[in-house]
């Protein structure tokens, strides 16, 4: 196990907010050709239907390694009712209900010359049959067009974000059936930016993604506001993690909170001792694009999808960790994770590894549990559902991936039984010789400082103002944990210089 992986695993083990969500049900769906040696399937989108069941869209791999889009109909318990395969498409990326109440899917379709086009297709909800379709315009006919997000506006037109060749992307507005877009965002001319998600706010749209670093391969986390009438930017902000060593940041998803601010999730990549560590990140910006806060969950992984849920924010992504296999070998694997945050993006809880009936095996035949999240939604009963790519017992020397759906019980995502001590302040960070703890209103709490080997270097009851002498501490990263008398927990990473 590398030093960085050991650090990440220890930090994850110490955090009081990490817990296992209870699962109402979880299902894996095996639809690939049995002749295929390694089956690769993934669920990208899920939508609840009027009968209480679900439609799930994604892709699967045939024996000849060609991909086909697929649609699954599930009942309320997640059991398969029927499936539909689309020979004209590679992936079904998004299911949605349009302004007319019709079911539609966004399909990726490969075209001659190595390009990909996007088709918005009206579907029969009873069997998945194609009724009609229109193609999204793009500036270059043979360009790759990987769907990332869209919004249908009240007048029926669409805002669309898609990835193109290389690190570039597309952001445009178009009317269904039109051969060209109403506008393409100005940044697309030189492929300087990639947009991944958006949220509509009146006559403006707030997008996230990343911008390329000129002359290099790194990217900067981007949040921008655009006028939907003209496609011109109102403002654009590059969000940088400033605690040293960051070499790459990317925005993946965005929501608007109840205060009118925007919460963007993604990841930053930090180089420590020449090892790249990919860490989830949440940025909060106000309506002017000013940075308000940064949340770091202290784990190795990414954030991919996000949604508002009651007065909270839930984000789905993946975490990486090391476990011992039955033969005592170390197996590195990844799990789908759900992050529970309050309205200001303060982390409340992290739930991971939902499919515990799949065991970690030996290094020669191990399988990952679940390693990619495609979507997160809430249903009519306020339950939380996640879908993505999971795994099952390998048919050969490699793991097979399959579509995976989990329904989480609404009171076990970590929100109802987890609190944050919002009256504690720890500073400075990084610290040299003196660490100061301030508890508002003389609140009493238990303080523990833990090093990367799980050892407590400091433990005490604190209230009011407390000063800790840190001169004897070794330089490095520590976890500060504060637990007040009600059991509320606050955890934060501390760097000792």
Image: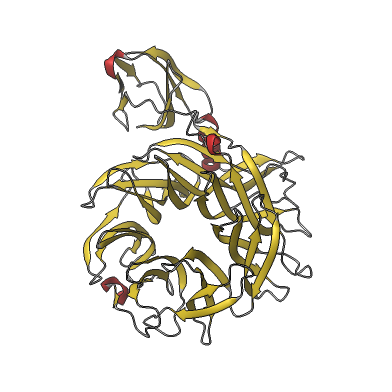
Placement of 357 over or under 146, stated as above or below: above
Left or right: 255 as drawn, with respect to 362: left
Query: Which residue is drawn at the image coordinates 64% and 62% (left, top)?
Result: 73
Placement of 104 over or under 284, stated as above or below: below
Query: Splitting the image into 4 quarters, where does residue 50 fall?
Result: bottom right
Placement of 368 over or under 121, stated as above or below: above
Left or right: 28 as drawn, with respect to 109: right
Placement of 280 over or under 96, stated as above or below: above
Left or right: 437 as drawn, with respect to 125: left
In front here: 57 or 423? Answer: 57
For residue 427, say whether it is visible.
yes
**How many numbered markers are drawn?**
0
- In which quadrant is the C terminus drawn? top left
The image shows residue 234 at horizontal and vertical percentages of 20, 62
The image shows residue 305 at horizontal and vertical percentages of 47, 53
Query: Which residue is drawn at the image coordinates 40% and 23% (left, top)?
Result: 473
The image shows residue 252 at horizontal and vertical percentages of 42, 56
The image shows residue 51 at horizontal and vertical percentages of 60, 56
For residue 273, say whether it is visible.
no
In front here: 293 or 485? Answer: 485
Query: Splitting the image into 4 quarters, where does residue 344 fall?
Result: top left
Left or right: 39 as drawn, with respect to 13: right
- In which quadrant is the N terminus drawn? top right
In front here: 443 or 481? Answer: 443
**Colour style of the rendered protein structure:** secondary structure
């Amino acid at each position: 196990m590398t030093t960085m992986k050991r650090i990440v695993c220890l930090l994850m083990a110490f955090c009081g907010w990490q817990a296992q969500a209870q699962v109402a049900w979880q299902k894996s769906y095996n639809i690939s050709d049995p002749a295929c040696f390694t089956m690769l399937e993934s669920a990208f989108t899920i939508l609840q239907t009027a009968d209480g069941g679900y439609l799930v869209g994604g892709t699967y791999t045939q024996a000849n390694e060609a991909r086909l889009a697929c649609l699954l109909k599930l009942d309320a318990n997640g059991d398969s009712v029927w499936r539909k395969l689309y020979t004209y498409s590679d992936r079904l990326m998004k299911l949605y209900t349009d302004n007319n109440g019709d079911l539609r899917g966004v399909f990726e379709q490969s075209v001659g010359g190595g390009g990909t086009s996007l088709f918005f297709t009206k579907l029969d909800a009873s069997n998945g049959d194609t009724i009609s379709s229109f193609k999204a315009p793009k500036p270059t006919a043979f360009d790759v067009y990987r769907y990332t997000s869209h919004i249908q506006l009240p007048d029926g037109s669409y805002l669309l974000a898609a990835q193109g060749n290389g690190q570039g992307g597309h952001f445009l507005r178009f009317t269904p059936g039109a051969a060209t877009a109403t506008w393409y965002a100005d940044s697309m001319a030189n492929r300087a930016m990639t947009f991944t998600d958006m949220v509509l706010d009146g006559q403006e749209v707030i997008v996230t993604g990343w911008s390329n670093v000129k002359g290099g391969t790194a990217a900067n986390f981007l949040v921008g506001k655009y006028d939907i009438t003209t496609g011109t930017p109102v403002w654009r902000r590059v969000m940088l993690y400033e605690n040293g060593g960051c070499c790459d940041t990317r925005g993946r998803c965005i929501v608007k909170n109840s205060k009118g601010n925007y919460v963007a999730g993604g990841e930053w990549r930090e180089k420590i001792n020449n090892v790249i560590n990919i860490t989830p990140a949440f940025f909060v910006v106000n309506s002017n694009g000013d940075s308000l806060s940064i949340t770091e969950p202290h784990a190795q992984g990414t954030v991919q999808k996000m949604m508002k849920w009651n007065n909270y924010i839930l984000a789905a992504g993946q975490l990486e960790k090391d476990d011992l296999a039955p033969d005592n070998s170390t197996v590195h694997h990844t799990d789908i994770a759900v992050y529970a945050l309050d309205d200001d993006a303060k982390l409340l809880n992290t739930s991971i590894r939902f499919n515990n009936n799949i065991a970690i095996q030996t290094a020669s035949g191990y399988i990952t549990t679940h390693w990619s999240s495609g979507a997160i939604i809430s249903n009519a009963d306020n339950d939380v559902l996640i879908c993505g790519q999971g795994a099952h017992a390998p048919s050969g020397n490699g793991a097979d991936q399959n579509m995976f759906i989990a329904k989480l019980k609404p009171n076990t995502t970590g929100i109802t039984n987890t609190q944050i001590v919002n009256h504690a302040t720890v500073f400075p960070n990084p610290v040299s010789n003196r660490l100061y703890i301030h508890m508002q209103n003389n609140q009493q709490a238990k303080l523990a400082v833990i090093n990367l080997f799980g050892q407590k270097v400091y433990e005490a009851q604190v209230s009011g103002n407390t000063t800790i002498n840190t001169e004897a501490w070794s330089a490095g990263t520590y976890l500060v944990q504060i637990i007040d008398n009600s059991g509320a927990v606050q955890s934060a990473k501390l760097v000792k210089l």
